[in-house]
Image (spheres, rainbow, N blue to C red):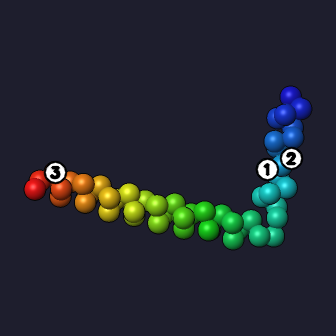
Amino acid sequence: EDDMNENDILKRIISTHPSYSLLLQSHINCLQVLSLSLISLSLSLRERKQI
């Protein structure tokens, strides 16, 4: 139970930090770039299979 409380406390500290929204937006942007890269790679691999 102490671990759960420590985890909750840490989450609360992080989420109330003044730069949290910037961190969150940066993370979302990173995931978007990764997704686009994976889509591009997938399409490239499909094209190679067709050749």
Using the rendered view, name the quadrant where residue 1 is placed. Answer: top right
- Mark 3, residue position: 49
In the image, residue 5 sits, relative to residue 32, either above or below, namely above
Q: Using the numbered discs, state the Cα–Cα distance from disc 1 to disc 2 in whole angstroms.
A: 5 Å
Horizontal and vertical percent for residue 35?
43, 59
Q: Give the left or right position of residue 23, taking residue 50 as reference.
A: right
Kind of residue at disc 1:
Lys
* Labels 1 and 2 touching (C-beta < 8 A): yes
Residue at (74% x, 65% y) in the render: 20
Which numbered dot is residue 11? 1
Which residue lies at the image location 48% right of the left edge and 64% below the top edge? 32
N-terminal label among 2 and 3? 2
For the residue labelled by badge 3, is the local secondary structure a helix, a strand or a loop? helix
Q: Position of residue 45 (x, y in %)?
A: 24, 54
| Residue sticking out furthest to the left | 51
Closer to the eye: label 2 or 3? 3
Residue on which disc 2 sits: 9
Q: Is residue 17 left or right of residue 23?
A: right
**Separation of disc 2 and disc 3 at Cα?**
50 Å
Which residue type carries mark 3? Lys
Query: Which picture quadrant has residue 27?
Result: bottom right
Sequence-first disc among 1 and 3: 1
Give the amino acid at mark 2. Ile
The residue depicted at 81 percent of the width and 70 percent of the height is: 18
Q: From the image, which quarter does the C terminus lie in?
A: bottom left
